[in-house]
Image (cartoon, rainbow, N blue to C red):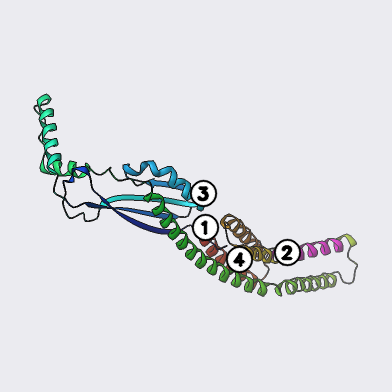
Amino acid sequence: MPVYSMTGYASAQHGTSAAGAETEGRATQSRRLGLEIRSVNSRFLDLSFRLPDELRAMEPALRALLTARLKRGKVEVRAALENEDSNTLQDPPARLLQRLNSLQDSVKSWLPNAAPLSVADALRLCANAHSGNEDWSEAVPVLAEEALTALMSAREREGKRLAAMLLDRLKQLRALAEQAVPMVPLLVEQQRQRFMERWKEAMALTDGATLPEAARDRALTEATAFAIRIDVAEEITRLDSHLDEIERLLKKGGEVGKRLDFLIQELHREANTLGSKSAALDLTRISVDMKVLIEQMREQVQNIE
């Protein structure tokens, strides 16, 4: 399965011709339904809809469609209905104008101080007279499916780019770990040499007298404990294990975002421990470089579904 990003955008349009009973032979007025879907990253699936009143009843169907194919992300669905040529004003039907005039007279008989209808009011009311005549119940699901398919394609393309970037960072982290591996026995051996030199210096200060056995045992214990503290072999082994698991998840694909996020946290923890146990400047540098790469990975993993 591919790796999907939670970031994407898609849109689709559908046109129709609407002819009401009041058009009196005039040319039919075409309307266009536009639908767009925007998606950004989120911990859970968060759906929001901005639909015109004519399409409010379609929200449950749209929600079911999105829930079936999307698992995470903040998703916004917008729909709009407009005339194909919004710059062209249609001639108001005479019967509608007569009806408006009759209604205005009826209102003014009860409310003589009411303001009369303006030309803009009459045009708007006539335009709205046919706005609810279309049946979009079949067009909306088809249009939404088209937009959702385009969104999934966009999220897949972005996910492929993110996976490639993460695999590149994995390669760099492995290279840094390989640099650190030969340093571990060298650091332990250096510490052993230091201990032996100091032990010889302490023996020389005693003028040949034998040190108490307790003092010797304590010195050996401290030297051993310090050698264990600076031994980062275990951290490097765990780090390699996490890198293998991240690579496996990226190749497997699917809903891997949350697992990747957890593994990135574990990587950061091992890199921190590597730096805190470092007894050499080169190992400290490697730890810092690792944390920079891991932070870059963390930012991108936040966008994976």
For the residue labelled by badge 1, is the local secondary structure a helix, a strand or a loop? loop
Tell us which disc is closer to us: 1 or 3: 3
Q: Nearer the viewer, residue 290 or 251?
A: 251
Q: Nearer the viewer, residue 266 or 84?
A: 84
Please indicate whether residue 212 sits to the left or right of residue 81 in the image: right
Q: Nearer the viewer, residue 79 or 280?
A: 79
What span is colored magenta in the figure? Answer: 215-235
Q: Amino acid at mark 1?
A: Gln
Tell us which disc is closer to us: 4 or 3: 4
Q: Residue at x 37, y 58 (%)?
A: 11
Residue identified by numbered label 4? 251
* Neighbour tally class for label 2: few under 14, some 14-19, many 20 plus, Cα within 10 Å: few
**Residues at marks 4 and 3 touching, judged by CB atoms closer than 8 Å:** no
For the residue labelled by badge 2, is the local secondary structure a helix, a strand or a loop? helix
Q: Amino acid at mark 3?
A: Phe
Residue identified by numbered label 3? 44
Q: Amino acid at mark 2?
A: Glu
Mark toward the start of the polypeptide (2 vs 3): 3
Name the chief secondary structure element in magenta. helix
* Neighbour tally class for label 4: few under 14, some 14-19, many 20 plus, Cα within 10 Å: some
Q: Residue at x 86, y 64 (%)?
A: 216
Mark toward the start of the polypeptide (1 vs 4): 4
Q: Amino acid at mark 4?
A: Lys
Q: Which mark is residue 16?
A: none
Mark toward the start of the polypeptide (1 vs 3): 3
Residue identified by numbered label 1? 302
Residue identified by numbered label 2? 234
